[in-house]
Amino acid sequence: MKKRLYHLFVAFTLLVVSSCDQNFDEWNTNRVDATNINPAYQLNQAIINSSASSFGTMVYELGIVQQLISPNSGVLTGANYNQDNRASTQNNWQVYYREVIKNTKDIIRRIQDDPSRQDLYQMTRIIQANAFMVLTDTYGWVPYTQAGLGFSDQQIFFPAYDSPEFIYGEIIKELTEASNALGAAGSNVETGEILYGGNVDQWRRFANSLLLRAGMRLSRVDPSRAGQIVQTAFSSGVILSNEDNALVRHDNNFLNPIGNTLNATEASNVYMTEPFVNYLKENNDPRLSAIAVRYVGATSGTQHTVDRQSFDPEVQIGMPMGLDNVTAVERAASMGLASFYDFTQIDRRRITKLNAPNFIVTASQTNLLLAEAVSRGWIAGDAGSFYSEGIRLHMEQIGTYDEASVIPDEEIAAYLAANPLNEGSALELINTQYWVSSLLNGPEAFANFRRSGFPNLAPNPYPGREVEFINRLTYPNSEISVNEENVSQAISQQGPDNLETRVWWHTP
């Protein structure tokens, strides 16, 4: 009896195992998760994360160039005290490597040899070049050649670092080749991408405008090469009208990162700076009333209410640099203010609202760079015309944030008539206007400030500062802990991993 039961058990087991083998592949196939994704959707993810508008940018770049500042410490420690805070200096690193480079490298691997997706391939190269420009401008030596390959067949988890000179050579090559190759015969029209809806002419102007930026970065270290690159970019066609601006459009699903912060946890903690507000006030700049708000008499954040708000440029008072949450109270009292909550803020109900756009490259910035290029003798044209057009375009661009920020044409015309380009101080005037035009684009404002030396800002006077001016941001602790050998090699070539070390094109 026992033997019979044993044989029945063995037979049943064999039957079950046989059945499992026959259906093994079917049973172990995930019918829910995607196994393939349209690379256009990956490009959109990379575009959304290319706006460089986030918490870390607010803590560092926008404070370094003295546009926005907070007197508070903790998570807001950064450019307000000119001190290192690697929880925030890591921001560009994490966003661009995790969300941009990871996707662009994968797209390129998948479609570079597909003739039907050649336009998407070129678009991806352009977005990737922009990301690497931000990264190397921010940190100096960074992974480039081996970056983003951890998810590839190569599985490089500890990428080597490349010199910024080499990276810039690659950026220039990528942008030039991508611009020339757009519109390839047989390529799909990539209407699914969110930047320009597949318009290759606009993508080409975007690429050439980035190339113009890259050329201008070399103005100190290699003027001859800079001039050649600028000439190539200009002759190939750059962004000259606001209709071609490269921007990320935010909505209820994809919120503006700075807007999300300034309408939530840090609503009453961040203020416009005294240097920025005073520059606009002293020059009767109509942009001040379009971007700023003061909650007159506020003694707390809860009093930042609509009934207290004033857009009148005459009453705007920027927060002085170098204050903490003790000295800010003392300074406000000495200035006759109700509290430090009485200083001027950027208007979170207009300019930094939740669905406000973020601009990557604008016609205003491009026109101002062309004005400088003419002044340097690199291209032909009228520097004054490019200069005035750059200002006008930014004033008109501000109106796209909110209807309440539209600047009347007559006010624009009056400002331009009163503020022509003076050839004797052309570089200072042009790059100071670039500073204003790059408001909220922290990495670009920071890069051009270092490159040009303008505006002429006084050092942050905070007593506990580590450096007078922040020249670069430090590597993330997470990168140092897992990729220590390659980080150490980069530091040995570049210099100390601190806020004072300069990137290669930022010469004294």
Image (cartoon, rainbow, N blue to C red):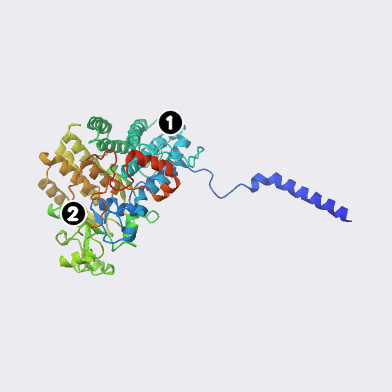
- The image shows residue 300, relative to residue 284, as above or below, that is below
Q: Which residue is mark 2?
A: 275
Viewed as shown, does residue 118 lie left or right of 263? right
Which element is circle 2 on? helix
Which element is circle 1 on? loop
- x and y percentages locating residue 356 in the rendered image: 31, 54
Snapshot quadrant of residue 393: top left
Q: What amino acid is labelled 2 in the image?
A: Pro
Q: Nearer the viewer, residue 214 or 59?
A: 59
Viewed as shown, does residue 50 lie left or right of 26? left
Q: Give the number of callouts.
A: 2
Residue at the spot 30% in from the left edge and 62% down from the top edge: 267
* Label 2 or label 1, whichever comes before in sequence order: 1
Q: Nearer the viewer, residue 347 or 328?
A: 328
* Eye-nearest disc, 2 or 1: 2
- x and y percentages locating residue 244 in the rendered image: 29, 42
Q: Nearer the viewer, residue 188 or 321?
A: 321
Task: Work out whether residue 29 can be spotted.
Answer: yes
- The image shows residue 340, relative to residue 4, as above or below, that is below
Q: What amino acid is labelled 1 in the image?
A: Gly
Residue at the spot 34% in from the left edge and 38% down from the top edge: 493
- The image shows residue 376, relative to residue 297, as above or below, that is above
Q: Which residue is mark 1?
A: 186
For label 1, the crowd category at 10 Å Cα-Cα, with few meaning under 14, some 14 to 19 and many 20 or more, is: few
- x and y percentages locating residue 503 in the rendered image: 29, 41
Task: Work out whether residue 198 can be spotted.
Answer: no
Residue at the spot 26% in from the left edge and 64% down from the top edge: 325
For label 2, the crowd category at 10 Å Cα-Cα, with few meaning under 14, some 14 to 19 and many 20 or more, is: many
Residue at the spot 36% in from the left edge and 48% down from the top edge: 92
